[in-house]
Image (spheres, rainbow, N blue to C red):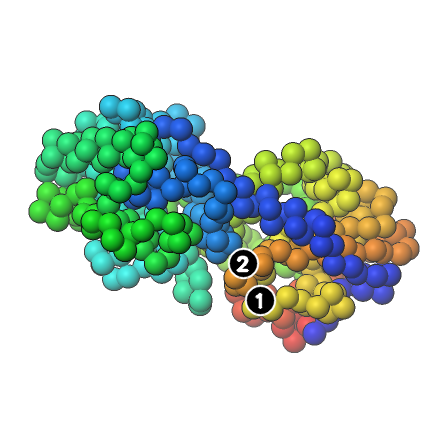
């Protein structure tokens, strides 16, 4: 395993517990909703306890799942729709909802770790939410988009369904009944009349809620009042919009300096082999969306801690994130154990090199790598403070790589990418990175 170029310039790596605890606290902060929403009607008992017990945070795994879903929603909506139609607020009899995309018919997007075959992939609560939006908009149906995340070796997948509802008056009546039940429970501080929710046994409020003895909750949408059909036309439409939104930014980023050989092949390639597929684009949106959502939570949870400064050298134009003045990069890992700090330059060389380059440009010897461990329950964060020496030498390597990229040098003259990248790299048959690394 090849160590980071910058390993020879590392003085010390410390584990920063103070910042780690701040980040963990920030991600668990919750905001209390005031108005009754469509989501509240799906599981009104859980909605009651989320409002009356804000001191109970969601589990770290649950918070991660919510961030992943929220982030992908936001990125997907930006890619396939416009501000005019994305995240549309609708109101109905004191109930509010946000439709993911609303042009002619409501479009509801759901994310899951894996998609089951056919209509088995559609859970009742998906239909309940879309049905509620149909009532609120006066439409007889809508579209359901299901995104299966690319995890555990499975590729990401997008499916579309056309949904028609045949009993909107009955659905509306049940919505109002649940609204009134939740209102009464909140006014009296008594959840006794609220039905059991679908999260029985998997909820952060299970020590408080008493779901075991609560009446069972039925679906808003009965099986006999809905028809569902796969919608290949919609899948094709959104796949095309995803490709249209795959714009390439000009100039270089820190990413190109961390993986310079791949960047060099990208400059030489005629573009045909490197054009991302729809699955590639879905994966990109998923990863980018998760980090943007995580960023947003941390920004709100640590007010004033984060700033961003632009940097430019030649054709390199990027930004450096500062956390209280320290260059900070936030990344995730699927590792099931924390990486020992002494192993960091070997296990995550691309992150360490990126941090070194940022420190060299900012002119500070200490940088911070925040790793979010997706597979580790509860204790998600590890914060590594890395102190570098000889920043001029680090900057010289940055400028050397940048010059080679700008001049169109043969890829073989640039440092190899990590061996793990070769498996999914479009240039794996000619780059030699797997052997070199």
Q: Which quadrant is home to the N terminus?
A: bottom right
Does the image show residue 411? no
Q: In the rendered view, would you say 122 is above or below 130?
A: below
Does the image show residue 212? yes
Q: Residue at x 10, y 38 (%)?
A: 166
Which one is in front, 108 or 397? 108
Which one is in front, 200 or 256? 200
Q: Residue at x 77, y 55 (%)?
A: 385
Badge 1 element: loop
Badge 2 element: loop
Residue 3 in percent (x, y) is at 75, 69
Q: Is residue 371 left or right of residue 70?
A: right
* Residue, disc 1: 335
Q: Residue at x 37, y 57 (%)?
A: 202
Residue 150 in percent (x, y) is at 43, 59
Q: Residues within 10 Å of mark 2 (few under 14, many from 20)?
A: some
> Residue 82: which disc?
none
Which one is in front, 119 or 197? 197
* Residue, disc 2: 378
> Viewer-nearest of labels 2 and 1?
2
Which one is in front, 41 or 12? 41
Residue 159 in percent (x, y) is at 30, 51
Give the distance between the C-alpha atoms of the residues marked 2 and 1, in whole angstroms.
14 Å
């Amino acid at each position: 395993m090849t160590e980071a170029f910058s390993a020879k310039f590392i003085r010390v790596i410390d584990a920063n517990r103070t910042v780690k605890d701040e980040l963990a606290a920030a991600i668990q902060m919750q905001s209390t909703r005031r108005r009754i929403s469509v989501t509240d009607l799906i599981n009104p008992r859980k909605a009651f306890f989320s409002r009356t017990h804000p001191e109970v945070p969601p589990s770290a795994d649950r918070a991660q799942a919510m961030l992943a879903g929220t982030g992908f929603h936001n990125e997907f909506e930006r890619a396939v729709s416009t501000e005019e139609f994305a995240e549309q607020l609708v109101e109905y009899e004191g109930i509010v909802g946000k439709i993911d995309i609303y042009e002619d018919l409501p479009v509801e997007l759901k994310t899951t770790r894996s998609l089951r075959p056919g209509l088995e992939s559609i859970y009742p609560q998906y239909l309940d939410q879309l049905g509620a939006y149909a009532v609120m908009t006066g439409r007889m149906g809508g579209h359901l988009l299901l995104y299966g995340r690319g995890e555990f070796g499975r590729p990401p997948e997008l499916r579309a369904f056309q949904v028609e509802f045949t009993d909107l008056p009955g659905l509306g009546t049940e919505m109002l009944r649940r609204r009134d039940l939740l209102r009464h429970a909140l006014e009296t501080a008594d959840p006794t009349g609220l039905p059991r929710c679908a999260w029985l046994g998997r909820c952060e409020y299970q020590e408080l809620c008493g779901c075991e003895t609560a009446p069972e909750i039925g679906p808003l949408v009965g099986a006999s009042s809905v028809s569902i059909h796969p919608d290949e036309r919609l899948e094709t439409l959104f796949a095309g919009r995803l490709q249209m939104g795959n714009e390439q930014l000009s100039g270089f980023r820190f990413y190109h300096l961390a993986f310079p050989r791949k960047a060099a092949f990208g400059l030489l390639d005629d573009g045909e082999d490197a054009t991302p597929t729809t699955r590639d684009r879905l994966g990109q949106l998923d990863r980018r969306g998760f980090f943007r959502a995580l960023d947003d939570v941390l920004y709100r949870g640590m007010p004033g801690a984060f700033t961003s400064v632009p940097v430019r050298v030649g054709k390199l134009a990027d930004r450096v994130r500062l956390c209280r003045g320290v260059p900070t990069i936030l990344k995730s890992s699927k590792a099931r154990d924390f990486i020992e700090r002494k192993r960091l330059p070997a296990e995550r060389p691309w992150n360490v090199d990126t941090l070194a380059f940022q420190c060299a440009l900012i002119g500070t010897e200490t940088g911070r790598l925040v790793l979010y461990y997706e597979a580790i329950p509860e204790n998600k964060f590890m914060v590594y403070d890395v102190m570098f020496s000889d920043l001029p030498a680090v900057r010289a390597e940055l400028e050397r790589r940048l010059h080679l990229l700008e001049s169109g040098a043969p890829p073989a003259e640039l440092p190899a990418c990590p061996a793990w990248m070769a498996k999914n790299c479009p240039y794996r048959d000619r780059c030699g990175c797997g052997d070199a690394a």
